[in-house]
Image: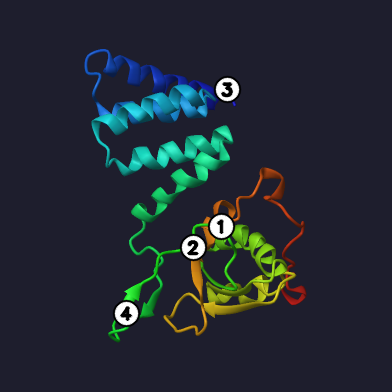
Amino acid sequence: AFYQQGHFDAAAQLAMDILATDKNRIETLLTLANALRELGQFDDALKVLRRIAQLDPNHRGAHAAYALTLFYKEDWPRAWRAFDVRFKLMDKPPEVKSRGADGGSVALKPWRGGALPPTLLVMGEQGLGDTIQFARFLPLLTAAGVKVTCVVQQRLFKLIGTLDAAIDLRPLETSGTVKGIKAWTPMMHLPQALNLEPSQFAPHVPYLHAEPERV
């Protein structure tokens, strides 16, 4: 802990030294913001990140750091909204299309919250760990009467299948068609769309169970 504290103190001091001669050095400001966040000075870090946004509104690294700082601060509503920056960092963000009246495909906007749709397509969007963590919210949907189809990595089918929920699993590795879907959402958007309180972030523990033959 002492080493880490010294590391971030040094980073902050270096950033301050550079800023003394040039207050608009964006990468230096970002270094300072990251150091302030790791030191627990969240409000000061957010001030620096807002300064970066003034200098470069499209700086994706600063937007990502802003979301991360809000998560550290446990400012959940703003953190989940700011977390949408992840789509700008992906090579291929999740997308769902439907057949238009002219026979062509039309991109569907994701469900952002509010009244639950009768059927919902949940798209896995990042790595195995993210899928495993955010799968905990799927039973909340089925318990509310939503028919859920979930697109995740095929190697996780058996593990996700241990959820206490009836979910139709489809492989993320291949494109496909699902009939009767009324809405869709990225998996990591569920806490925001469901308007969950922190006490609901672990609705049932354990929510997954290891396959006995693989223990």
Name the front one of labels 3 and 4: 4
Which type of secondary structure does the marked residue at label 4 adopt? strand
Label number found at residue 111: 2
Q: Does the CB distance between marks 2 and 3 fall below 8 Å?
A: no
Residue 186, given in percent of the width and then of the height, sits at: 49, 63
Residue position for label 4: 105
Mark 1 is surrounded, within 10 Å at the Cα level, by few (under 14), some (14 to 19) or many (20 or more) other residues, namely few
Q: Does the CB distance between marks 3 and 1 fall below 8 Å?
A: no
Label number found at residue 114: 1
Mark 3 to mark 1: distance in Å? 46 Å
Residue 197, given in percent of the width and then of the height, sits at: 66, 45
**Between 30 and 49, the one nearer to me in the picture:** 49
Name the front one of labels 3 and 1: 1
Residue position for label 3: 2
Where is 25 relative to 96, above or below? above
Query: Which sits earlier in the primary sequence, circle 3 or circle 4?
Result: 3
Mark 1 to mark 4: distance in Å? 26 Å
Which type of secondary structure does the marked residue at label 2 adopt? loop
